[in-house]
Image (cartoon, helix red, strand yellow):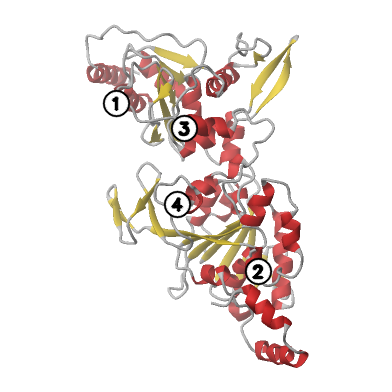
Amino acid sequence: MTSTAEIMARLSKMSAEEKAAIDELLAGGPIWVPQPGPQLMAYASPADILFYGGAAGGGKTDLMLGLCLTDQEQSIIFRREAVQLIGIEKRMAQIIGHRKGYNSTDGVWNLPNGKVMELGSVKEPDDWMKYQGRPHDAKLFDEICHFTELQFRTLIGWLRSDNPNVRQRVVCAGNPPTTAEGEWVKRFWAPWLDKQHPNPAKPGELRWYVVDEKGQDLEVPGPEPVKVGEDWVKPKSRTFIPSSVDDNLFLSSTGYKSTLQSLPEPLRSQMLRGDFNAGAADPAWQLIPTEWVKAAQARWTERIEKGPMTVLGLDPCRGGMDKTGIARRHGQWFDKMVSVPGNVTKDGPSTAGVVVPLVRNGAPIAVDGIGIGSSALDFLVGLNLLVHAVIGSEGSEQFDKMGNLRFRNKRAEMYWRLREALDPDAPEPIYLPPDAELLGDLCAVRYKIVTMGQKSAILMRSKDEIREALGRSPDKGDAVAMCFADDIPKPIREAKKTSWRDRLAVAGRQQRGSAQAA
């Protein structure tokens, strides 16, 4: 295959007459054709979900516009903010030579040959609902790392076409994430982007995935349908194809590469080489440094002998897209996280049915004591278990370990204690299980210093604010943080005379009896 550099070298040696002859030949050709190299490879890729790019200047936007002009009938290109779509509008006008058929009010462009391209934005976390049920045979995401994982997964869920002859595809373009909130992209395409992945994939190689009953991605051997629960599910294929400014004919002679070379590190490595492992800078007020969490997960190993359970952290959920998160602490070591769909823990008895079998050694259960968690709290108390209510908005009298800062409330207290335990300089740093969602949860927490009387105090970002940043509830992170509230009681080591099954059954009968009496 001829490279872009070779094409440019040949063009530079052509006479004016030869160039005019080429122009005449191209005049009757297609509106757009992919450039040889990675762009053509991406254009022809059979992947259901493609990530193209990495480095800046690789022709990412042109690939998406080209697909809208050629292969697809009803396409939509998303940017996180509407103002970012202006560049896409201008580039399409350059390619086709006019703006005829474009309705700027609706963001819909009627293209040649009866094709339609829509431009959409999802600035707010829940803006994806504007596009619920809208049929598109191609969903294209420019700068994918700017979107939340929830936005992406929900939007691609409505990919469909009434024309069986038109292929349905998802194409994403973007550079490496520059903040921790874009880390989900590295997880989604981990075989290509994560150097630590146990089974790495080559550029353009297909891998197949389904979503299991717990809502987690599960890699499967191939495209053949697999059974998930009671249903047979057809896997979706993914791939990643890297590109750089050297692959783009239109930028090779503009000096754009020199601009990228002049950027400071790690931005230079991210934009020039598409290095997804170049350190994304943590925001100034990120509570727990990303590297601290990664270090805690790196030193974790599976244990047969876990030691006595110290506390179980419980963040309940009763439905929707959120999940019930459960953290099991054994001293400085945490067991694997337990995550249960919210529709399974819809009330106190069902939550207890999940939690009680996990409790060991008379360990206390630290549970959210208000809102959704109150039902689970009441039922667990009725089982004569050691239950500790954690109310995040409740005041705290504690100070940080240096004795300089107070905590604005209980939520600040428990998250700051978790930060102190993750500090690499701590005498006994904790061990956290390798869990991508847990990493995302903990790195999404922000804080600020506020005045509290005559003292300065730590105030945490609310759970609703974290939900907006992540596109989901930080259930696993909250479950771990609850294990660090200062007033958690010590485990009760005395053996119970009745089993947890018997206590659960008795409590269930009592609840049903109370309901009938009412």
Distance of mark 2 from mark 4, alpha carbons?
26 Å
230 vs 141, left or right, is left
Which amino acid type corresponds to the residue marked 2 in the rendered image? Asn
Label 3: which secondary element: helix
Q: Is residue 263 above or below residue 118?
A: above
The residue sitting at 61% across, 42% down in the picture is 279
Distance of mark 1 from mark 2, alpha carbons?
53 Å
Which amino acid type corresponds to the residue marked 1 in the rendered image? Ile
Residue wearing tag 3: 297
Q: Exactly how many numbered labels are in the figure? A: 4
Label 2: which secondary element: loop
Distance of mark 2 from mark 3, alpha carbons?
39 Å
Which amino acid type corresponds to the residue marked 3 in the rendered image? Gln
Which amino acid type corresponds to the residue marked 4 in the rendered image? Pro
Q: Earlier in the sequence, mark 3 or mark 1?
A: 3
Give the image location of residue 400, x and y in percent.
Answer: 62, 14
Q: Is residue 166 above or below residue 271?
A: below
72 vs 331, left or right, is right
378 vs 400, left or right, is left
Residue wearing tag 4: 191
Q: Earlier in the sequence, mark 1 or mark 2?
A: 2
Q: Do the residues labelled 2 and 4 touch (CB within 8 Å)?
A: no
Q: In this view, does 39 lie above or below 477?
A: below
Residue wearing tag 1: 304
Give the image location of residue 438, x and y in percent.
Answer: 48, 34
Residue wearing tag 2: 248
Q: Which of marks 1 and 4 is nearer the N terminus?
A: 4
